[in-house]
Image (cartoon, grey):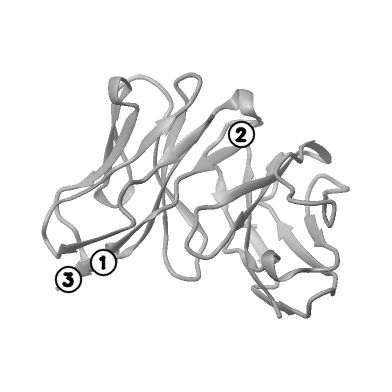
Amino acid sequence: GAGVSQSPRYKVAKRGQDVALRCDPISGHVSLFWYQQALGQGPEFLTYFQNEAQLDKSGLPSDRFFAERPEGSVSTLKIQRTQQEDSAVYLCASSGQGTSPGYTFGSGTRLTVV
Amino acid sequence: AQSVTQPDIHITVSEGASLELRCNYSYGATPYLFWYVQSPGQGLQLLLKYFSGDTLVQGIKGFEAEFKRSQSSFNLRKPSVHWSDAAEYFCAVGAPWQGGKLIFGQGTELSVKP
C-alpha cells in the first residue's frame, strides 16, 4: 500500500479484556516496529521485526504484551487482560532498508482502557 | 544511558517569526538524528535526518537542523513560521547497530500566533 495502515483507529476496552491491534506495513518493507505513546510523551519502543523474525522485544512492558508477524508482512500487537496504564496510542512503523532507521509511521491506534 | 532531551515543552511564536527548537542527546557514539512532526490524531512525519557529512541538513517544509557534536545537539530551525506549522515536534536518535530502534524526546508543542 501507499503508507502504513493501522486498525482500528480507536479502541475502547474494558479492564481485563484482550485486544488485538493490526499493522499493515508498506509493501515490501522488511522491518516493522511497534511504539507506545502515552499522552503528552514521546513514543517508546516496544518491539521490532525483520521479516517474520522478532529481533528485539526488550520494550514490551509485561508478558501481557505479545506481537507477531507470521508471514513477514502484517503484524498484530496483542494485549491480554488490559489495564488502565495500557491506555496510549500504539504506533507502527516500517522500513524498507533492513535496519536503517528513519522509517514511515502509521497514524496509530488510540487505546482507551476503562 | 541513552536519552534525548527537548528542554522546551511548549513554545509560542508569531506567524512569520523565526523558530528554533532545541534537542540534546546522550549516546555512546554519534547516532543517527531525526526530527519528526506530529499533528493531532496523526502519525509521525519525518522532517529531516542526519547520518553523516554536512552538519547542516535541509528537510521538508522549509525546516533545517544543525548537528553540533561538541554540544551533543541537533536543533531544528525555520526562518519564517507559518500557521500550519503548529504541531508537536519530536527529536529522535537511533543507530543501525541498535536494530533501527529510535529513542524519542518528550516533544515540543509549537503554537503559532496570527
Q: Is residue B61 above or below residue A87?
A: above
Relative side of A45 to B64, left or right? right
Image location of residue A74, percent across then percent down: 78, 54
Left of B52 or right of it: where is B63?
left
**In which quadrant is the N terminus of chain A drawn?**
bottom right
Q: Nearer the viewer, residue A62 or B44?
A: A62
Q: Are marks 3 and 1 in contact (CB under 8 Å)?
A: yes
Q: Which mark is residue B111?
A: 1
Of callouts 3 and 2, the N-terminal one: 2
- The residue type indicated by label 3 comes to Lys
Residue in view at x 79 percent, y 68 percent: A82
Helix, strand or loop at disc 3?
strand
Label 1 lies in what chain?
B
Badge number at residue B100: 2
Q: Residue B42 in the image: x percent, y percent?
A: 50, 66
SS class of the residue under badge 1?
A: strand
Query: Which amino acid, by three-letter code, is at mark 1?
Result: Ser
Q: How far apart are marks 3 and 1 (CA)?
A: 7 Å
Q: Where is A23 relative to A17, above or below?
A: above
Chain-order first, disc 2 or disc 1: 2
The answer to the question of whether label 2 and label 1 lie on touching residues, with beta carbons closer than 8 A, is no
Label 2's element?
Answer: loop
Q: Mark 2 is on which residue type?
A: Gly
Q: How crowded is mark 3: few (under 14 residues within 10 Å), some or many (20 or more)?
A: some
Q: Quadrant of the C terminus of chain A?
A: bottom right
Subunit bearing disc 3:
B
Numbered mark located on residue A37 in the image = none
Q: Which of A104 and A56 is in front in this view?
A: A56
Determine the residue positioned at 70% across, 72% down.
A8
> Label 2 neighbourhood size at 10 Å, few (<14), some (14-19), many (20+)?
many
* Residue indicated by mark 3: B113
